[in-house]
Amino acid sequence: MSDGIVHRQPRRGTPKIRPATEADAASLLAIYRPFVESTAVSFETVAPTTDEFAARIAKAVAGWQWLLAERAGQCIGYAYGSAHRERAAYRWSVEVSAYVHPSHQRQGVGRTLYERLLEDLAQKGFCNAYAGVTMPNVGSIALHRSVGFESIGVFKSVGRKFGKWHDVAWFQRPLRSSPPREETAT
């Protein structure tokens, strides 16, 4: 009998969260590839190679953070930070993304990843985190709201994939009130 309420599936234990390395690229790409090939969740139209994905991990680890979640030694999800925009004035803002294997969704994996990622990014001095969500995506919106993100707008028909236009909802979460130090232009 259905009570009309969407119930969270029981957790299988809190996953282990650790920084990703380039050696994790193949496992993490196995999670990401179906999102590229079968959904509009990612606006990439061709999945990257393992080497390309490893380079992305290295870049994120060097400037922001890339974390993965494991259960029983198996990668089940990941979250990372990247540049929000390239101009210098954006240096204290970060864009974040999370991907969780479908068989591990709605079990707290994304939330656990984001909680740790956002904490790490705040410690690195980032002040605001931004996330874009291809619409519709009730689960991703719920995830972002559950860790303190607020809706700040929608880019209408901003991406075209699978012969269809897609909207992207944008979310923001403050991480800290000011950067660790203000740099002045010379």
Image (cartoon, rainbow, N blue to C red):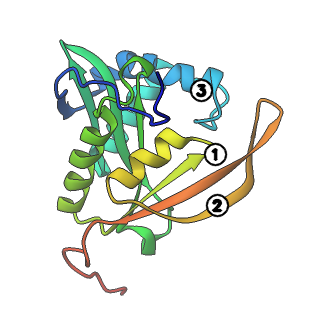
Give the alpha-carbon distance from disc 3 to disc 2, as whole Å: 21 Å
Q: Position of residue 63 (x, y in %)?
A: 31, 51
* Residue 167, percent from left and from top: 69, 50
Q: Earlier in the sequence, mark 3 or mark 2?
A: 3
Disc 2 marks a residue whose amino acid type is Val
Nearest to the observer: residue 113 or residue 59: 113
Q: Report the residue at 56% width, 26% height from top.
A: 35
Q: Nearer the viewer, mark 3 or mark 1?
A: 1
Of label 2 and label 1, which has the lower sequence position?
1
The residue to which callout 1 is attached is 135
Asked which secondary structure carries label 2, the reply is strand
In the orientation shown, which residue stands out farthest toward the right? 163
Residue 184 sits in which quadrant?
Answer: bottom left
Question: Which of the two marks, 3 or 2, is nearer to us in this view?
Answer: 2
Rendering quarter of residue 9: top left
The residues tagged by marks 2 and 1 sit, at their Cα atoms, a distance apart of: 9 Å
Residue 133 or 37: which is nearer the viewer? 133
Q: Marks 3 and 1, Cα distance to the nearest angstrom?
A: 15 Å
Badge 2: few (under 14), some or many (20 or more) residues near its Cα, within 10 Å? some
Q: Are marks 2 and 1 in contact (CB under 8 Å)?
A: yes
Q: Is residue 171 visible?
A: yes
Position of residue 46 relative to residue 132, above or below, is above
Location of residue 98 with respect to 154 vertically, above or below: above
**Which residue position is annotated with label 2?**
154
The amino acid at mark 3 is: Val
Q: Is residue 96 visible?
A: no
| Residue 99 percent across, percent down from the top left | 42, 32
- Residue ID at (21%, 18%): 71
Q: Which residue is mark 3?
A: 36
